[in-house]
Amino acid sequence: FVATAIAREAMPGRPSLDASLRRLVERECRAGGEVSAAALYQRLSDVASRLSLSEAWVERCRADPLECGTAQGGRLNRAGRRLCALRLETLHRLEGRLETCITARASLRGLMLHYGTEADEAQCCFRLSAQDQPDRAPKLLLAMTAARHRKASFRIWPARLSELDERALRTGLGPAALCVALVGYLPELQAEEYELTL
């Protein structure tokens, strides 16, 4: 009943999106079995948040405001098209009065990217790592730390970024531009009160 009610919420003039939403609702209902309407809505809200960020990622790659080399004249180039395969698989955000903790996993061309942010009133730590096989531990690509009112300090592992690009991503962007895109075009995975810029 709940799935039917939600699926009836059509998107006028957007038949392909409407069909995708219906499939999403049906899949979530099958996966969850008998769940309450509130639980199902929460699950769908979580999925919608991930899909929204994935689409925002595509839009930012197309606009390329940080000039990473993902587009030209508002059109994705080869590097941008390859990066647009990114999909957020999990996203968890916990916010307290003084602390923020964000963890996310994103799949991209056979890689699993791990994003992590821990922030409190004194400082913020951000890490990006990548895993190319499920049985291997993720390798750090970037670690940044920022204290309030101070410039962020960071460490990048360019050799690892180059290796991942050559073996899986094949964007040809170079380690610095690739790292800036992976971090800068997903600002929602960072603590808002800190500006972590490379």
Image (spheres, grey):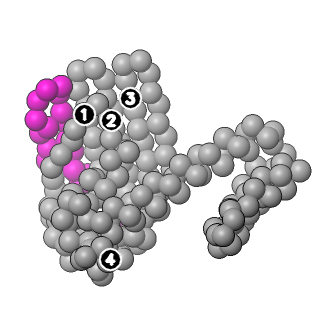
Q: Nearer the viewer, residue 141 or 180?
A: 180
Instruction: Decide: few, some or many residues near mark 1? Use Cα within 10 Å; few <14, some 14-19, many ≥20.
Output: many
Separation of residues labelled 2 and 4 (CA atoms): 28 Å
Circle number at residue 100: 3
Separation of residues labelled 2 and 1 (CA atoms): 6 Å
Disc 1 secondary structure class? loop
| Any part of residue 110 in sight | no
Residue 136: quarter of image: bottom left
The amino acid pointed to by label 4 is: Leu
Instruction: Decide: few, some or many residues near mark 3? Use Cα within 10 Å; few <14, some 14-19, many ≥20.
Output: some
Circle number at residue 194: 1
The amino acid pointed to by label 2 is: Ala
Q: Kindly report which numbered mark, 4 or 3, lies closer to the viewer in this rendering.
A: 4
Q: Which residue is mark 2?
A: 191
The amino acid pointed to by label 1 is: Tyr
Residue 142 belongs to the span the image colors magenta: yes
**Residue at 66% in and 45% down:** 43
Q: Which residue is mark 4?
A: 76
Separation of residues labelled 1 and 3 (CA atoms): 11 Å
Separation of residues labelled 4 and 3 (CA atoms): 33 Å
Seen in the picture, residue 47 relative to 69 is either above or below; the reply is: above
Label 2 vs 4, first from the N-terminus: 4
**Residue at 37% in and 44% down:** 189
Label 1 vs 4, first from the N-terminus: 4
Label 1 vs 3, first from the N-terminus: 3
Residue 147 as seen in the image, left or right of residue 119: left
**Residue placed furthest toward the bottom:** 78
**Residue at 32% in and 77% down:** 75
